[in-house]
Image (cartoon, helix red, strand yellow):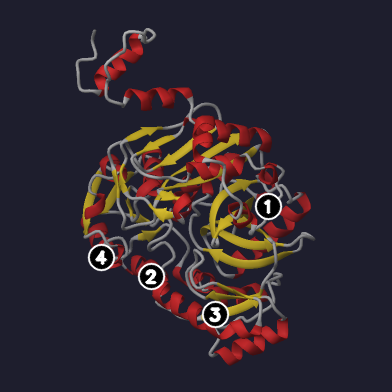
Amino acid sequence: MIRRILIANRGEIALRVLRACRELNIVPIAVYSDADRAAPHVLEADEAYRLGPAPASESYLRGDLILEIARRSRADAIHPGYGFLSENASFAQACQEARIRFIGPPPEAMRMLGSKTLARQAADRAGMPRTPGSVQGLASVDEARSVAASIGYPVMLKAAAGGGGKGMRAVSRPEDLPSAFDSARSEAERAFGSGEVYLEKLIEQPRHIEIQILADEHGHCVSLGERECSVQRRHQKVIEESPSAVVDAGLRRRMGEAAVRLALAAGYTNAGTVEFLVDSDRNFYFLEVNTRLQVEHPVTELVTGLDLVHLQIHIAQGEPLPFTQSDIALRGHAIECRVYAEDPDSGFMPSPGRITRLLQPGGPGIREDCGIYEGWVVPMDYDPMLSKLIAFAPTRDLAIARLRRALDEYVIGGIRSNLGLFRRILSDPDFCAARIDTGYLDRLLSHAAPPSGAEASDCVPAVAAAVLEAMQPAATTPTAAPPVSAWKAAARREASGADPRP
């Protein structure tokens, strides 16, 4: 049995895993960089150990240091979360050799499916539909020209390793291919340490649909329905939801069966996600596999009633899945917003700094997976995700309404965030009618946003306005001014540093 888990991550996902450990009576052990000494996951953990300086290359990406701390802290297992070392097959192998359980797939399956080119080869062996194109890395631009000519333009160049939109280039004309090939390889080399790229047919205006899978170590694998991830910017997801408005029971079954077939053929275990593109005729094409827990896993948890982190830990202990495919049923609708410290009005520039005011939403159907607190300084060294705001309701329309209401309650002061962008998306008629594809957000952003003043007056709730007013210095009250309520007067005195009592 697993008694002690080292969480090799930070932010909201570290807190998410920490809470699951507590619920299973497992000791959660945190690690941190110098930038995260006062981070929430460190303050909440039973034990916390310093990794090193702020840069991830000197802290969260140091598998050798993490394993050393795991031994020193007597951890039985390591949960990698997502990002950092979560899809590093060499790290998973090192854990195996150190007799510390890696809560994820075995290194062999990770190597096979973590590489986009090897995964496309595995998809062919499993009889899965995929986009036409190469199944091996391209050796030269001449080879890229040959493949592109055979499948026709437009095409997409992609890095064989990693994800997050890095090393991806869309090419519409043959004359643009050489420069795109060079820049894609260069970016892939910088981001992932491998310049290998491949080429596939570009499916225009597709929907990005992914299937969550779970597989135990006894040969059982199930799919847990789909997530719609089409609202993206630069190939990075912004909003996710489950179920998809365009996936019916038949398509869900076919995509789920294909995902399970691939996982079983690769000897995959634990949680994973098989991603597809779906065209306007509802044909689906294999895209890639994420060999880890996804950022957007909460929407699947809400519509299935399952706890994926609990199940990850049970699988890592060698337990069989406690259900079969026929037991899985989707109920209701869930939508997730990825809340970032970034400024959409300034090219989505990161906005690190101190959080001076934090009002968090709540109420029926609202879940927030959060990694911040008032007074905390958001570092500039990592991905700027602050939290994930999720709404759940019996219908999509009600989930949207609940999410709008929660966004109106959400105030993050001192830094810029993308909360206003979500208000805009959730008020857009095309999004509300589920008329979305992977180009939807770019089209929305190409139009001028509503005036910021009007948006603020429409969206900031009364309680937030009162708090912001209370933060202003007290002013001399003119003789003819209307009377001030006792509550407001006390708030003003407190904000100015005076005794709030009359």
**Residue denoted by label 4:** 58
- The amino acid pointed to by label 1 is Ile
Q: Quadrant of residue 67?
A: bottom left
Residue type marked 4: Glu
User: Mark 1 = which residue?
Assistant: 436
Q: Nearer the viewer, residue 49 or 203?
A: 203
Q: CA distance from mark 2 to mark 4?
A: 20 Å
Residue positioned most to the bottom: 142
Q: Is residue 87 left or right of residue 375?
A: right
> On the image, numbered disc 2 is attached to which residue?
93
Q: Mark 3 sits on what residue? A: 180
Looking at the rendered structure, the kind of residue marked 3 is Ala
What's the residue type where badge 2 is placed? Gln
Quadrant in the picture for the C terminus: top left
Mark 3: which secondary structure? helix
CA gap between label 3 and label 1 equals: 27 Å
What's the distance in space between the residues labelled 1 and 4, CA to CA? 40 Å
The disc, 3 or 4, on the residue closer to the chain's N-terminal end is 4
Which of marks 4 and 1 precedes in the sequence? 4
